[in-house]
Amino acid sequence: EDQVTQSPEALRLQEGESSSLNCSYTVSGLRGLFWYRQDPGKGPEFLFTLYSAGEEKEKERLKATLTKKESFLHITAPKPEDSATYLCAVQVADRGSTLGRLYFGRGTQLTVWP
Amino acid sequence: DADVTQTPRNRITKTGKRIMLECSQTKGHDRMYWYRQDPGLGLRLIYYSFDVKDINKGEISDGYSVSRQAQAKFSLSLESAIPNQTALYFCATSDLWGGDTQYFGPGTRLTVL
């Protein structure tokens, strides 16, 4: 059965303290791995897509990397406005369909305090 | 204006009532999805649609139905709401030829008493 596991469940960082969030997956037929940011009471906001091992993407203080079994979201010198829940999702080819089904992890709740 | 809108944003209803949640998009995407989010469980797919004539069940479709009225509109109905359908509901859209990245609406918080 496909599984996506995110760790830690919650992370508290002081402003400027860099760290990484982990997303490990066990799927067959991976089409892509997605990172989203979700603020309380809002919909997930797309951040990155990674398609192959070794790929990296960057956006401001965030950098996402991908291996064959996991992805990391590195946060460099975070600020309080980076506080949110970060969701990882793997996209798997659906048999007999062009659907790229998304399987979500439960998220990592990041709090950055001044 | 937001690309994906959902109405209502909040709804409180009683057990047994029929409820419709609506989703509209201006992104021009052909694919639309309905998810629910529960604390500690992550997002789960309820239904998805590739175009107006193509509607498919997701992993948790029991108790729900959908209607794709137009390329830009996708509605989710709870025929007879029950308390364990209390959750956050999100609509999403994607374009296969644009990489199939799913973009989410702001969500509807539904409470069934």
Image (tube, coloured by chain):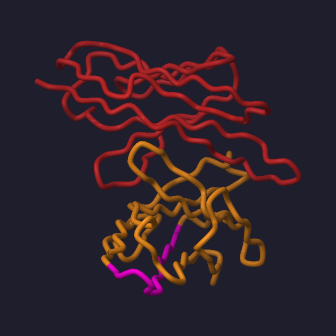
The colour chain B appears in is orange
**Residue A104, how many percent across, how many down?**
55, 41
Q: Quadrant of the C terminus of chain B?
A: bottom left
**Residue A33, how many percent across, how many down?**
61, 33
**Residue B92, how many percent across, how many down?**
54, 59
Q: Tell me which residue sits at (62%, 29%) in the image.
A: A50
Q: Nearer the viewer, residue B80 or A48?
A: B80
Residue B91 in view here: yes
Location of residue B69 with respect to A95 vertically, above or below: below
Magenta highlight range: B13-26
As drawn, the residue found furthest toward the bottom would be: B17
**Residue A86, how many percent across, how many down?**
40, 35
Location of residue A27 with respect to A69 vertically, above or below: below
Q: Tell me which residue sits at (46%, 38%) in the image.
A: A106
The colour chain A appears in is red
Left or right, residue B16 beside residue A83? right
Q: Tell me which residue sits at (63%, 69%) in the image.
A: B62
User: Is A52 one of the magenta-colored residues?
Assistant: no
As drawn, the residue found furthest toward the left would be: A114
Residue A63 in view here: no
